[in-house]
Amino acid sequence: MSEIYRHLDKEEFEDITSRILYEDNHLLIFNKRSGEIVQGDKTEDEPLPEKLKAYIAQRDNKPSRVFMGVPHRLDRPVSGIVVLAKTSKALQRMSEQFRDGDVSKFYWALVEKSPEPVQGEIKSYLLRNEKQNKSYSYNLPKPGAKEAVLRYRLLEPTKSYFLVEVELLTGRHHQIRCQLASIGCVIKGDLKYGARRSNKDGSISLQAHRILFKHPVKNTPLDITAPDFPTFSPRKDTPHK
C-alpha cells in the first residue's frame, strides 16, 4: 500500500465503509457526521476528503495519489449527504450543477417551534458577518445581502420538537439555520441562532437528507437519501416526498 496517506485502523476503516451511500469511478457520496469538516479550517482538524483519500488508498492499494474534489460543502455541525468527486471531470461538472441550481437538496431539521403556516416559502436577503461567522436575514434588499429562498413543510411533531423538511433553492451561508430562526423555528442545538440549549455532542439537529441530480458523466438520474436522524425515527407513515 502507498505510504502517501496515513493507515486507518480496522474500526475507522469499517466505519467509513458503512457510511458510503454511493460510489463509482466518478463519485463518492458519503454520510457525514456532525463535527466532521468538509474543507480545512483554522482548527487544522483532518478534512473529510483527506480521510477518504486515505481510505481509498488503503482499500484499493493505490500506489499513487488519490483525487477527491469537493463541489459543495456542509457546515461542520450539520450531518448528512456530502457529494465528492473522484475525477477532475466529475468535479467540474458537479460544481456547475451546484452553481446553476440543477441539484435538488432536501434537509431535515428538528426545530423548537412548529412553523406557521405548516408549509410555505421563505424569501429574504441574507447578510453575512464574517467576524461573527453568522448571517442575518432581512425582508428587503440591503447592500451586500444576497437573496435566499427555501421551501419548508412540517413532517411531524416529536415529544418536544418539530420535524421539518426544507428544500433549499439557493445556497447561502447558514441559510437554513438563519431563515428558520427568522420565523421563530430555531434548530435544536443551534446556539448561534438562538437555541434554548446545546446538544450534548455539540451538533445541531440539521441533516442533509436527500439529494437528486444527474450523474456528471453517465447523465443518469441519481436520488440519494441519508439514514434518519440517529436521535429521531419518524413514524413509518411519515411522508418523504
Image (tube, rainbow, N blue to C red):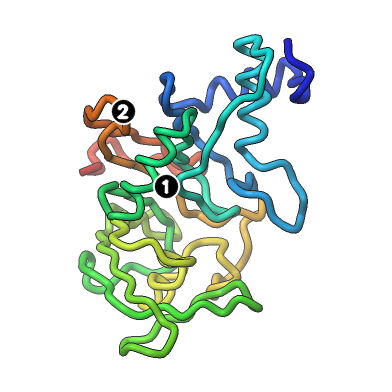
Residue in the picture at 32% in, 49% down: 105
Q: Position of residue 61 (x, y in %)?
A: 65, 9
Give the numbered dot on residue 208: 1
**Is 5 positioned to the left or the right of 139 in the image?**
right
Q: What's the residue type where badge 1 is placed?
A: Ala
Q: Closer to the observer: label 1 or label 2? A: 2
* Quarter-of-image position of residue 150: bottom left
- The correct choice, above or below, for 50 with respect to 186 in the image is above
Q: Nearer the viewer, residue 132 or 232?
A: 132
- The correct choice, above or below, for 128 with respect to 58 in the image is below
Residue in the picture at 43% in, 28% down: 27
Q: Position of residue 77 (x, y in %)?
A: 58, 54
Q: What's the residue type where badge 2 is placed?
A: Val
User: How far apart are the two marked residues, 1 and 2, measured between alpha carbons?
Assistant: 23 Å
Residue in the picture at 35% in, 35% down: 225
Q: What quarter of the picture does the C terminus occupy?
A: top left
**Is 184 positioned to the left or the right of 65 in the image?**
left
Q: Which residue is mark 2?
A: 217
* Quarter-of-image position of residue 9: top right
**Is 232 positioned to the left or the right of 63 in the image?**
left
* Quarter-of-image position of residue 59: top right
Q: Could you say whether the residue bearing mark 1 is in a helix, strand or loop?
A: strand
Q: What quarter of the picture does the N terminus occupy?
A: top right
- The correct choice, above or below, for 69 with respect to 121 in the image is above
Q: Position of residue 74 (x, y in %)?
A: 51, 51
